[in-house]
Image (cartoon, rainbow, N blue to C red):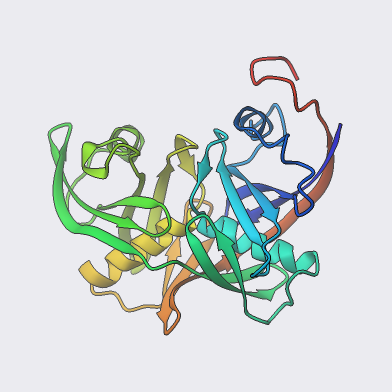
Amino acid sequence: MKLDFVKMSGAGNDFIVLDNRDGSLDGMLRRDFIARICRRGLDIGADGLLELRTDYELAFMMKYYNSDGGQAEMCGNGGRCIASYAAMKGIAEEGEAFSFRSVAGVHRAVVLGPDTARIWMTEPEISFLDRIIELDGAGMSVSFIDTGVPHAVVLADRTEPPPFESAAPILRRHPAFGAAGANVDYLWNEGGMLRMRTWERGVEGETLACGTGAVACAICANRLMEIEIPVDIAVRSGESLIVGMDGAGWWLEGEARHVYSGTMETDPSKSLTESH
């Protein structure tokens, strides 16, 4: 079977994008299949998959799947990428605001140029700010904020947390964040520039950028570090994301770039463990 797809990057978060407005891919988009085509080096490879679906009230519906094939409520950079993709497909007009739906709720978006898009997030839910959590004998200043998906933000300037690579995969499953756990973001100020690193659940590894994480970090920077917004936050890819707030809520802006289009020869019935 031939599968047409688009590869997109949102400041370093990369996605496979599929147009499923006609429902023809419904039987194919199983967890095992999505996990298989997201494998790097063996298939297309991506942090996750974006599915564009028909919505009879709004511009479209977005479904987001992590690279393990599990569905997540929202992805900030994915939302910006699919907004840009919708403009490419003629579903939305560049420069004109529109609304689309995710599992997390309704989002407003605007495509600002061929490689830039902004989305407004659903209202963040702050569970706690600046709580000291012990991990491996070290106390960490952690905030827990849901910006469409839950994030544990570690303020690395306030304490001396364990190294990101060793602590993040453990903290991601800390009981303070419930049974589903949370994405983990380390946030610090380096010479006047905010920087962040993110460990994403569902990917179970570090990603080069995280949009919902950038919003969670911006909230912490504003509330706990007295940094004014809008604010630029540098992500692991070397790109930066801009986070601000206006009358419509918290917004996220940055690169949303079409990398390439392709057609993949695939057998959707093949399992993840079978050779490709």
Residue reaching furthest to the front? 56
- Left or right relative to 140: residue 206: right
Front-most of residues 43 and 137? 43
Q: Is residue 116 visible?
A: yes
Residue 143 in the image: state x and y as whole percent.
24, 55
Question: Vertical placement of 213 versus 254: above or below?
Answer: above
Front-most of residues 90 and 169? 90
- Left or right relative to 152: residue 23: right
Question: Vertical placement of 267 versus 238: above or below?
Answer: above
Q: Look at the image and tell me in which quarter the N terminus lies.
A: top right
Q: Which of the 4 image quadrants contains residue 255?
A: bottom right
Q: Is residue 190 visible?
A: no
The residue that appears at 47% across and 56% down in the rendered structure is 235
The residue that appears at 48% across and 51% down in the rendered structure is 73
- Left or right relative to 93: residue 64: left
Q: How many numbered circles are shown?
A: 0
Residue 93 in the image: state x and y as whole percent.
74, 77
Question: Vertical placement of 135 versus 103: above or below?
Answer: above
Residue 245 in the image: state x and y as whole percent.
41, 78
Front-most of residues 239 and 120? 120
The residue that appears at 33% across and 65% down in the rendered structure is 191
Q: Look at the image and tell me in which quarter the C terminus lies.
A: top right
Q: Which of the 4 image quadrants contains residue 91?
A: bottom right
- Left or right relative to 24: residue 249: left
The residue that appears at 30% across and 35% down in the rendered structure is 173
Question: Vertical placement of 176 versus 33: above or below?
Answer: below
Front-most of residues 68 and 139? 68
Residue reaching furthest to the top? 274
